[in-house]
Image: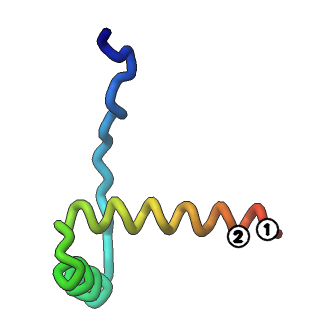
């Protein structure tokens, strides 16, 4: 039996970062051995979850 669930659609997001913020993010991604693309996706996901938790707590 095949699953009727479809994989989530992907969207493209363009980030404009200060060069120092970008360098810092790349250094963190390298030290964690995470691809740049995956690192930024994870950072956005975790940041959004943190903002949601903070808004619910208030």
Q: Which residue is tagged 2?
A: 54
Answer whether labels 2 and 1 touch (C-beta < 8 Å). Answer: yes
**Residue 2 spot, x, y in % from top left:** 30, 12
User: Which of the numbered marks, if any, corresponds to residue 16?
Assistant: none
**Residue 19 spot, x, y in % from top left:** 25, 85
Is 42 on the left-hand or right-hand side of 12? right
- Placement of 27 over or under 47, stated as above or below: below
**Residue 52 spot, x, y in % from top left:** 65, 61
Q: Locate residue 23: give its quadrant.
A: bottom left
- Placement of 2 over or under 52, stated as above or below: above
Frontmost residue, 27 versus 18: 27
Frontmost residue, 42 versus 3: 3
Q: Locate residue 39: give its quadrant.
A: bottom left
Q: Which residue is tagged 1?
A: 57
**Residue 30 spot, x, y in % from top left:** 17, 80
- Placement of 19 over or under 48, stated as above or below: below
Q: Residues within 10 Å of mark 1 (few under 14, many from 20)?
A: few
């Amino acid at each position: 039996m095949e699953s009727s669930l479809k994989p989530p659609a992907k969207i493209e997001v363009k980030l404009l970062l200060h060069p120092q913020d970008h360098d810092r993010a790349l250094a963190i991604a390298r030290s964690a051995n995470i691809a740049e693309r995956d690192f930024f996706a994870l950072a956005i996901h975790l940041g959004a979850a943190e903002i949601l938790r903070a808004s619910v707590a208030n």
